[in-house]
Amino acid sequence: MNNKLKFLFQPKTHWFLYILLLILTPFLLLQNYLQSFIGQMSVQAFEVFNINFPYTVAIALIIVIALIIFLWKKFTSIRLIGWGVILLLFWIGQKSTDYYFNHDFYELQYNWHYFAYGIFAYLNYRRLSVKKVSPQKLILNIYIYAICISTFDEAIQIPLSNRIFDLGDIAKDLWGTIIGLVFIFFILENGKILKNGWKIRQKKTKDYIQNPLSLFLLEIVFAYILMFISSILTDTKYLFPAIFISILIFLLFFFIFHLSQKKLYRYIFLTLFISLIGVQGIYFFKYKNQNIIYNNNRLLIYKGIPIYYFDLLIHPDGMFRLVDKKETFNKRDLQKFMNLSENILIIGSGENNTGGRGFPKDTESQFIYNNITNSGLQIIKLENKEACKKFNQLRDEGKKPTLILHND
């Protein structure tokens, strides 16, 4: 085989070509309407015993069964745990991002970033394995390359495709890289990363980079924090706050994680933790039947639980979660609201009344047809304090409104 043909089969060539594909894919999808086609293909289903069964789920099951049959002898406890961890990471990623998108778990668009950067991690692993680099250098290299390539990919899309710089996509790409690294170390290498034991806390901070397991744990923590924060601060005006908050939370985690190996600090942190849980528990049980007890500026207290700065969604059953901080909703968001709500949706438009846009009418109250429940849905849009009062009033009357509160 001549040198030119050898070059085509080298891992470095495959890695480089795949990077080009990662960068070009968004433009190919947008320009050729492939994105909408993939979305439609994801929801195609066939009927089995009067139950719609998606083709994507059927194909995935066939692949899983085939792998079990052909690789049964190579299955070990570590590899089985690795596959379980990968499924868990997919689930965590889906539960943490794109809440308003109303995607089903099996849709290809929903999982694109995880698959794409999982494959990227594997190809980068093949490239570096030829050089026989250490596991810690491999983990760090793959992670940094993923951040750089994903950031570059997002940046060049702004002028070329009239899109925005999406920190959430970078975070999902990082999460896909984590999935790829789990596949590499716990399935391909059958847990070789654990050969030196499970010790993850190190005496010196610089030693965390030298220990592959410690480094990998820190990468997982940062990737998750960034994914969670970027999913509730998606607007470009929150780009730097999202990065700052993510780094701050990560540093706080690392500070506690590292210092807690010393007995004195461990007792201090444990005392603080128990005290905070105790105080929060007292306030929760004291106000658990009173719904929203305080709302002023960016602080809201719901059932004794303080929520600051972020937007909040309270479900009809009283459960709540942080949601995307936005002023204008789109059609996809409205479909999610119909899926969440029973018959009343209250929108807190912010202290300055800048939020709650995107509905058919810009009025305080309106009715729209809910095609999921086949009934009317009343939408009430009020300034935050009034929205909280209305929510409490309806809850006291035995009704179950959905509340979305925008903190501007």
Image (cartoon, helix red, strand yellow):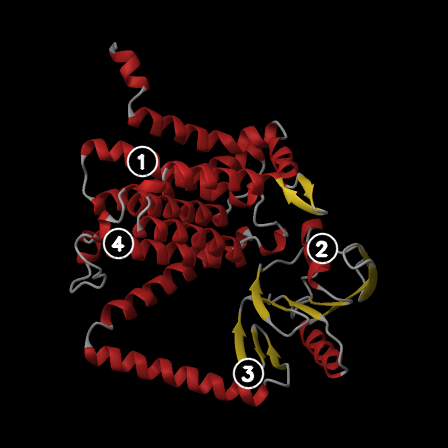
Q: CA distance from mark 4 to mark 3?
A: 37 Å
SS for dot 3? loop
In the picture of the structure, the residue carrying the numbered disc 1 is 124
Residue at 66% in and 40% down: 45
Amino acid at the residue labelled 1: Asn
Which quadrant would the C terminus be assigned to in this image?
bottom right
Position above or below: 378 against 391: above
Dot 4 or dot 2, earlier in sequence: 4
Find residue 269 and report its horizontal and vertical position in percent: 30, 78
The label on residue 304 is 3
Q: Secondary structure at mark 1?
A: helix
Q: Earlier in the sequence, mark 3 or mark 1?
A: 1
Q: CA distance from mark 4 to mark 2?
A: 41 Å
* Vertical position of residue 208 compared to residue 167: above or below: below
From the top left corner, tell me how far across and down residue 274 is, in percent: 37, 83
Residue at numbered disc 4: 215
Instruction: From the top left corner, tell me how far across and down residue 377 is, in percent.
Output: 80, 63
Q: Say what secondary structure mark 2 lies in.
A: helix
On screen, residue 41 versus residue 246, left or right, reads: right
The quadrant where residue 272 appears = bottom left
Q: Secondary structure at mark 4?
A: helix
Q: How many labels, in total?
A: 4
Q: Residue at x 67, y 54 (%)?
A: 333
Residue placed at 58% from the left, 87% from the top?
287
Give me the C-alpha separation between circle 4 and circle 1: 17 Å
How far, Cα to Cα, is label 3 from label 2?
29 Å
